[in-house]
Image: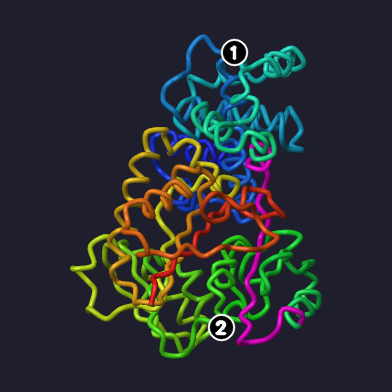
Amino acid sequence: MAKTRASAARAVAAVLSGRSLSDALPPLLQPLALRDRALAQEIAYGVLREFEPLAFLADGLLKARPKPNEVFALILVGLYQLLHTRVPEHAAVHATVEAAAVLKAQRMGGLINGVLRNFMREKEARLALLERAEPAVQHALPRWLWTRIQQDWPEDAQGVADALRQHAPMSLRVNAAHGSRETYLARLQQAELAAEATRHAVHGVRLQHAVAVERLPGFADGDVSVQDEAAQLCAQVLELGSCLGAGMRVLDACAAPGGKTLALLEHQPGLDMLALDDDAERLQRVDENLTRAGLNAKTQAGDAGRPETWWDGQMFEVILLDAPCSATGVIRRHPDIKRLRRAEDIAQLAAQQDRLLKALWPLLAPGGRLLYMTCSLLREENEARVAAFLAAMPPGAVNELSLEGDWGRACAHGRQILPGDDGMDGFYYALLEKPA
């Protein structure tokens, strides 16, 4: 069990050094026994989800943070087990101290043991101190992000912070071309997987408990894909049933890993679809997903902001721009975002979003529609970008289409879903039309 804790600590330390958890964790899980992988993953994700409170408690028990990062991460691993798991206290402390040897930090075992046992003895007093810590710490958020959330969503800030600490549900998109949602729910019931229909996405299903995709009926045959309900709404926002037909040219400008490409093609397999992404390696995922679903689209590596390097000169009737963003709306799925993002990143991302909007608009045919979307909850990346784009365009050059619905909330421009709204991730949508 010491190896399990050591793997979790190494993953956390890697994130503290700037690597993403999705990159760092899988190779660390590989050597573990199957039964231990789930625990190592839960601890690594949990420590990053609760990093600020755990670090506050650890700092209160230490004279200084030990080096290297792996040792400090291991202390957080121990505290997380004592606070958030059912692992017996003595077993959690013993396995965590033993993990120091796995990390080749045996000399730090005494320090780790002392910190964890002191916390156990002083638990009530330490937690009382935590209750008096600054709000960002109490909400398990970096100070800059908590400040932004308060500024952007003053009436919803508490709910957003609470939602970002939760485990995200596993949601699926049923391929309507292969069968109805009702039929697939029956297949899940037969497979003893509890699920329910999503409230807003018409082809969505939410599982009661996450499972490996191999357990999903028909996954290998493209009957279903994993996609959050909020992301599934892109197809409905585009009103596919009435505005897209076979042969229409569609650009998915930042396509990897391909969930939205598949969603559009499942509605209308006859689309002339180009899935573009600047990461050739991630673009392979799009090809794999298309193959699994039996759908056809052209995939191409290229920078959406530099059409001269990849565009063939033919206009698109629809452009889907899922713009690179802070991903603050999906922190509950990727808690490492809280460690990897910095306040200064937001202005840089906003500049990139402006660049992409400006570059792609000339590629849209008259009468065509561009859907701008992000998985951010920050206004600077969302409605502010649309406002800036509209202000920069000549009068009458852009029609902003109203997005009506009982999901999310209307903004000055577009519509925002906040994390936790009806169980969804945080997403933003704005639909723009080029006058015919």
In the figure, 279 relative to 6: above or below? below
Observer-nearest residue: 397 or 178?
Answer: 397
In the figure, 261 relative to 179: above or below? above
Residue 166 left/right relative to 340: right
Location of residue 314 in the rendering, given as x and y in whole percent from the top left corner: 27, 81
Residue beneath disc 1: 60
Q: Secondary structure at mark 2?
A: helix
**Which segment is the magenta one?**
161-182
Which residue appears at 50% of the width and 76% of the height? 262
Badge 2 amino acid: Ser
Location of residue 290 in the rendering, given as x and y in whole percent from the top left corner: 46, 79
Q: Quadrant of the C terminus?
A: bottom left
Q: Secondary structure at mark 1?
A: helix
Measure the C-alpha gap from mark 1 to mark 2.
Answer: 60 Å
What number is the disc on residue 242? 2
To which quarter of the image does residue 303 belong?
bottom left
Q: Are marks 1 and 2 in contact (CB under 8 Å)?
A: no
Observer-nearest residue: 17 or 69?
Answer: 17
Badge 1 amino acid: Gly
Which residue appears at 63% of the width and 49% of the height? 36
Is residue 167 inside the magenta stretch? Answer: yes
| Residue sitting farthest toward the left | 308
Which residue appears at 42% of the width and 50% of the height? 387
Is residue 410 inside the magenta stretch? Answer: no
Colouring chosen for the image of the structure: rainbow
| Residue sitting farthest toward the front | 395
